[in-house]
């Protein structure tokens, strides 16, 4: 029994999937190239006498130099340095599902980090098994959601593997980490460790945390813009774009057919230029904390605005009223790291069915941080232009039937009103 094992264990192991420090032989380390995971790379070799294989996953982090990351891992003694370009799988299997579900957590966060973690952890499991690693190591802290997403994925997909999370357990402050890095010849000057914020990004968005962001009364400072042109400095000339969808997914930009990865990269560039998709967000974390995040999500803002509009046009009033409830459940499961929960797949099946008719084109105007839908068209629009004109009858619509409809439709409310009046 896991409980008994925990009681007998000579060290403080809380969960059954945590590694026993005495039996760590070969570790697969999820490696970003930043300060934390670079210190971990050395520390794991030193502390456990273990071999370390690094895995770096490309999910479309803008401007990331992946070959420099690999060279750094090699220099720090990694046995093997894997670099996996998972952009296609991320777009097709994770972001596409989020688009169909209009997935936003807390009304503002398009879940780019939350969508990436189960894929990163799944790849870690696959490569750990292939390379006979017994442990997976990650650099998440004990305060965030990412530890939940990564560890629950590993525990679900690979019950035989163990996990270590040194940043969570070693309680090294930033100063100690820097001192450790200096002592062990870990280069400090380049890459993400020079940015004053804690950053995570991929092709669906970018987040910044830390510093003044933790002070709720502090308005956003200009240097937090890492992807977007601040709206005030965006071009004075608005830009119109046309986004075509097939079955709920964007397939062409301005008439040019594109794969999802290329399309999202292009929309990121266009939206970023116009300062579109800045989100200053208060968020309820899974681990109980409330935090403030700054998000830069140009592609998600454009795609979801257009997608929602097209759905509205091709769906009935009942479909339009019901889907948001299910979208919220979907977004919560993704946020909470429960990607492998059966309900997530059930909801996904619903989203696919609901998107069968979501084909058509939406034109948008981008201007100094704003996105407006300006034109819509779809072969599936539940819209008859002949009937939309004021005071016409014809086809399926009978204006003469309106008074009878009103009498019956208002009946329960009228009865209740009368009863309430009589009680006064
Ligand atoms: N608050 C967001 C989330 O929980 C973003 C997290 C960013 N992760 C990071 N390690 N900086 O998904």
Image: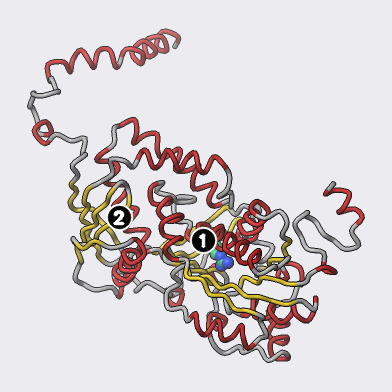
The C terminus lies in quadrant: top left
Residue located at (34% from left, 36% from top): 320
Q: Decide if residue 196 is on the left or right side of residue 409.
A: right
Res. 296 mark: none
Residue holding disc 1: 116
Q: In front here: 51 or 263?
A: 51
Q: Is residue 218 above or below residue 282?
A: below
Q: Establish if 249 lies above or below 352.
A: below
Identify residue for label 2. 250
Image coordinates for residue 287, horizontal then vertical, percent: 65, 54
Does the numbered disc 1 mark a residue whose Cβ is under 8 Å from ligand 1?
no
Q: Quadrant of residue 163?
A: bottom right
Residue 268 horizontal side relative to residue 190, left or right = left
* Secondary structure under the numbered disc 1 in the rendered image: helix
Residue at 82% over, 68% down: 23
With respect to residue 403, does 363 lie above or below? below
Q: Nearer the viewer, residue 224 or 138?
A: 138
Near mark 2 (Cα within 10 A), the count class, few <14, some 14-19 or many ≥20, is many
Q: State left or right for residue 369 relative to residue 127.
A: left
């Amino acid at each position: 029994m896991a409980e008994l094992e925990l009681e007998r264990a000579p060290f403080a192991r809380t969960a059954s999937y945590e590694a026993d420090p005495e039996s760590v032989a070969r570790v697969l380390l999820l490696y970003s190239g930043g300060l934390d995971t670079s210190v971990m790379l050395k520390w794991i070799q030193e502390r456990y006498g273990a071999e370390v294989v690094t895995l770096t996953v490309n999910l479309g982090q803008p401007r990331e130099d992946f070959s420099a990351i690999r060279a750094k891992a090699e220099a720090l003694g990694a046995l093997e340095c894997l670099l996996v370009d998972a952009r296609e799988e991320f777009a097709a299997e994770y972001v596409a599902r989020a688009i169909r579900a209009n997935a936003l957590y807390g009304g503002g966060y398009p879940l780019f980090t939350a969508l990436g973690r189960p894929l990163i952890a799944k790849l870690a499991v696959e490569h750990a098994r292939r390379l006979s690693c017994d442990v997976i190591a990650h650099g998440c802290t004990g305060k965030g959601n990412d530890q939940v997403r990564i560890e629950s994925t590993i525990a679900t997909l690979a019950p035989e593997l163990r996990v270590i999370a040194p940043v969570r357990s070693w309680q090294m402050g930033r100063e100690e980490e820097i001192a450790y890095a200096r002592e062990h010849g870990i280069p400090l000057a380049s890459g993400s460790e020079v940015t004053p914020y804690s950053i995570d990004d991929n092709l669906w968005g970018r987040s910044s945390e830390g510093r003044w962001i933790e002070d709720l009364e502090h308005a956003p400072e200009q240097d937090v813009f890492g992807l977007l042109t601040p709206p005030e400095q965006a071009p004075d000339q608005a830009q119109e774009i046309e986004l075509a969808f097939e079955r709920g997914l964007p397939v062409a930009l301005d008439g040019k057919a594109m794969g999802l990865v290329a399309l999202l990269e292009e929309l990121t560039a266009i939206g970023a230029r116009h300062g579109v998709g800045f989100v200053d967000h208060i968020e309820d974390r899974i681990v109980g904390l409330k935090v403030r995040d700054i998000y830069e999500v140009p592609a998600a803002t454009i795609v979801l605005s257009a997608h929602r509009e097209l759905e509205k046009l091709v769906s009935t009033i009942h479909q339009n009223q019901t889907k948001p409830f299910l979208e919220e459940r979907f977004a919560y499961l993704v946020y909470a790291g429960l990607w492998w929960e059966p309900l997530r797949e059930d909801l996904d099946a619903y989203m696919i069915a609901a998107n069968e008719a979501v084909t058509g084109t939406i034109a948008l105007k981008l201007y100094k941080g704003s996105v407006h839908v300006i034109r819509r068209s779809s072969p599936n629009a539940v819209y008859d232009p002949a009937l939309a004109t004021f005071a016409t009858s014809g086809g399926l619509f009978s204006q003469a039937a309106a008074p009878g409809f009103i009498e019956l439709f208002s009946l329960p409310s009228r009865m209740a009103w009368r009863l309430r009046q009589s009680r006064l």
